[in-house]
Amino acid sequence: MNILHVTNSLNPSYGGPAACIPALSSALAALGHPSEIACLDAPDAPFLAAIDAPVHAFGPVGHGFGYSPGLLPWLKTQARAKRFDAVIVHGLWQYPGVAARLAFPPGGATRRLVFPHGMLDPWFKRAYPGKHFRKLLYWLFVERCNLVGADAVLFTCDEEKRLARSTFPASSYPARVVAFGIPAPPDRDEAQRAALYSAYPDLQYRPFWIFLGRLHPKKGVELLIDAYGALAKAGSFALPRLVIAGPCDDAEYLAGLKALATHICPADSVVWPGMLSGDMKWGALRAAEAFILPSHQENFGIAVVEALACRTPVLISDQVNIHREIAGDLAGLVEPDTAEGVRRLLRRWLDLQPDARRAMRATAERCFLSRFEMGAVARGLVATLA
């Protein structure tokens, strides 16, 4: 099969699908199914040069809807030539989805699939009611048609599929579950740890927990700091340090998080390294005693899967949509995204015996390899397309 991926951007700084689509394309090619990618980035964007698959860039475009006059004519040309057996649209609410539907209508020779990547989660409806009203109008007149007419709408897990049905009316689209994932991390354990310790030498001499991700109110970082501070105040446990790593677009919000940690946590117990990438990121995930994400909403959680790939147990909220898979594989611990839930999450980890923690490292790796390693993901997608 020849497969075309259509997406708004491949900029890896956006994380999520943008960072994973090139890896998925490579994994599909390794199975004998070459991929190409159409995006709305500028053709000379430097990050495109590192992508193995052929990339057709139709940008730059402005923020928002992402209209590009060149995309639809090019897609129609590909449809007439029948170059692709399947087209996979990544993401919702933007022009590429409309263009793909117009170029590859229902019943055509090329199958069209849509990967919402968490964009139908009802959390956004509750958190941003104003935006939801605008999306509701767009859903009724545009996006619903994109999904109802698709050959399949792909969800990363059963929980995402279940939640998506409750967000908008008339959700009678053909839903399938196909796991998403990442490639195995580079096998340079010692070099990756060395990169971390060269920048943060104190982390070499005391165990630490890590939160790694964008610092945003939906991530539950306040709950984590509060729970950590409460455990420290109780004095019943010898706590690891807490590393809170990730970018933040809101300086005021970041200052508030740091002020909270200063107020309720022991001095120098919370480390703020900012965004970690490359060897330093992998070194931090490998060296951490546990990865923590008490998110209020998380479709998939790339960082969760990255931690599993590093044999690091994950302590997550039940609002991370893959929490059932994590709990079922004994790859981590799960609790509600509440103050008491996060405190209980940390206490449960601290109560585990060393043998149980070591065993969970092994099950974390097995969970990754069986469910989320990109080769396994590609095989699942091919089976769906067969």
Image (cartoon, rainbow, N blue to C red):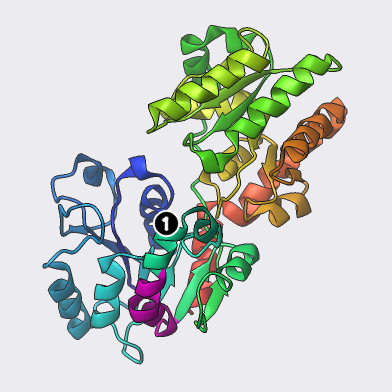
Q: Magenta part of the protein: which range?
A: 136-151
Q: Nearer the viewer, residue 252 or 66?
A: 252
Query: Residue 189, how many percent across, how many down?
Result: 55, 26
Q: Residue at x 50, y 57 (%)?
A: 124
- Residue at the limit of the structure toward the front, as seen here: 130
Give how far across and how far down residue 167 sits, in percent: 53, 69
In the image, taking residue 212 as reference, residue 22 lies left or right, namely: left
SS of the residue under disc 1: helix
Query: Residue type at mark 1?
Result: Leu
Pointer 1 residue: 24
Q: Is residue 343 magenta?
A: no
Residue 221 in the image, given as x and y percentages of width and height:
59, 33
Residue 289 in sight from this viewpoint: no
Placement of the N terminus among the 4 image quadrants = bottom left
The image quarter containing residue 13 is top left
Of residue 142 and residue 71, the one placed in the foreground of this image is 142
Residue 352: image quadrant is top right
Q: Position of residue 91 (x, y in %)?
A: 39, 62
Q: Residue furthest bottom?
A: 107
Give the side of residue 195 with respect to residue 146, left or right: right
| Magenta-colored stretch includes residue 139 | yes
Q: Residue at x 55, y 57 (%)?
A: 123
Q: Main secondary structure of the magenta part?
A: helix
As drawn, 382 above or below 352: below
Residue drawn where x is 28% and y is 58% of the image:
8
Residue at the image position 76 percent from the left and 16 percent from the top: 232
The vertical placement of 308 against 98, above or below, is: above
Residue 332 image-quadrant placement: top right
Which one is nearer the viewer's eye here, 160 or 184? 160
